[in-house]
């Protein structure tokens, strides 16, 4: 791996940590990577998260994305209920989110991480009402490109904290937003 790629990956990981610690805020990837489009953006972020030791699941309709993750990062594809990472390139799981690993009381950190590719992210203007650690009062982000039904599923799988999933949203412009399992999701 080239030195500049390693530096970019470290900067991307720091950006991800910042977004995860401040739910509902929008952070821009430092350098999305070579090329344009969703695959380049996804790969830039995925390099910080996936490797040969973790598993992933991508819907069958996006098998090319799953192949890319396996080829470039060594991550193994598995079924939804076994995956460490679930990737939904069209912003919707079609109910598969309900199958995601949620961890256990002894090991809540074994819940899956869900990555949604969406159209646009903004810190204000949405109908969501986020509260919890890292949010001073409330956050009301706009996530364009994800159905309200999907957000209801996310609220459902995270209803029994500390069990649940961590969600990462990545938009077409290289911005990301996180909603960790500790965040309470309401709708205005």
Image (cartoon, helix red, strand yellow):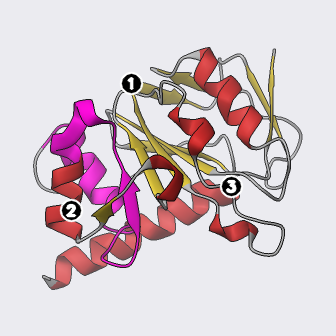
Within-10-Å neighbours for mark 1: few <14, some 14–19, many 20+:
some
Residue holding disc 2:
70
- 56 is within the stretch colored magenta: yes
Circle nearer the viewer, 1 or 3: 3
- Among the 4 quarters of the image, the one containing residue 70: bottom left
Give left or right: position of 185 versus 30: right
Q: Earlier in the sequence, mark 1 or mark 3?
A: 3
Q: Nearer the viewer, residue 139 or 46?
A: 46
Secondary structure at badge 1 equals loop
- The answer to whether residue 186 is left or right of residue 10 is right
- Give the left or right position of residue 58, taking residue 2 as reference: right
Location of mark 1 (residue) = 119
What is the CA distance from the residue labelled 3 to the residue labelled 2?
23 Å
On-image quarter of the C terminus: top right
Q: Residues within 10 Å of mark 3 (few under 14, many from 20)?
A: many
Residue 141 seen in this snapshot: no
Residue 68 rendering spot, x and y as whole percentages: 16, 54
Question: Is residue 141 placed above or below 135 in the rendered structure?
Answer: above
Is residue 99 something one can see in this rendering? yes
Return the x and y of residue 185 as percentages of the image width and height: 78, 33
Query: In the rendered structure, which segment of residues is drawn in magenta?
Result: 36-65
Q: Is residue 59 above or below residue 49?
A: above
Quarter of the image holding residue 33? bottom left
Residue 175's x, y, as percent? Answer: 42, 42
- Tell me whether the residue at label 3 lies in contact with that at label 2, contact meaning CB atoms closer than 8 angstroms: no
Secondary element type, mark 3: loop
Q: CA distance from mark 1 to mark 2?
A: 24 Å
Of callouts 3 and 2, the N-terminal one: 2
User: Do callouts 1 and 2 mark residues in contact (Cβ within 8 Å)?
Assistant: no
Where does label 3 land, which residue?
102
């Amino acid at each position: 791996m080239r030195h500049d790629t390693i530096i970019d990956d470290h900067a991307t990981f720091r950006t991800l940590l910042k977004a995860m610690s401040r739910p509902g805020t929008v952070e821009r990837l430092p350098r999305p990577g070579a090329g344009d489009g969703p695959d380049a953006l996804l790969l830039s972020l995925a390099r910080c998260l996936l490797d040969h030791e973790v598993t992933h699941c991508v819907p069958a309709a996006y098998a090319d994305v799953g192949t890319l993750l396996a080829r470039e990062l060594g991550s193994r594809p598995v079924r939804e209920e076994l995956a460490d990472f679930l990737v939904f390139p069209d912003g919707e799981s079609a109910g598969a989110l309900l199958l995601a690993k949620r961890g256990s009381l002894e090991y809540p950190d074994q819940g899956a991480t869900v990555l949604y590719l969406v159209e646009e992210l903004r810190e204000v203007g949405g109908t969501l009402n986020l509260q919890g650690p890292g949010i001073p009062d409330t956050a009301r982000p706009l996530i364009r490109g994800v159905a309200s039904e999907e957000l209801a599923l996310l609220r459902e799988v995270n209803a029994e904290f500390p069990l649940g999933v961590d969600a990462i949203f990545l938009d077409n412009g290289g911005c990301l937003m996180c909603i960790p399992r500790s965040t309470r999701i309401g709708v205005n």
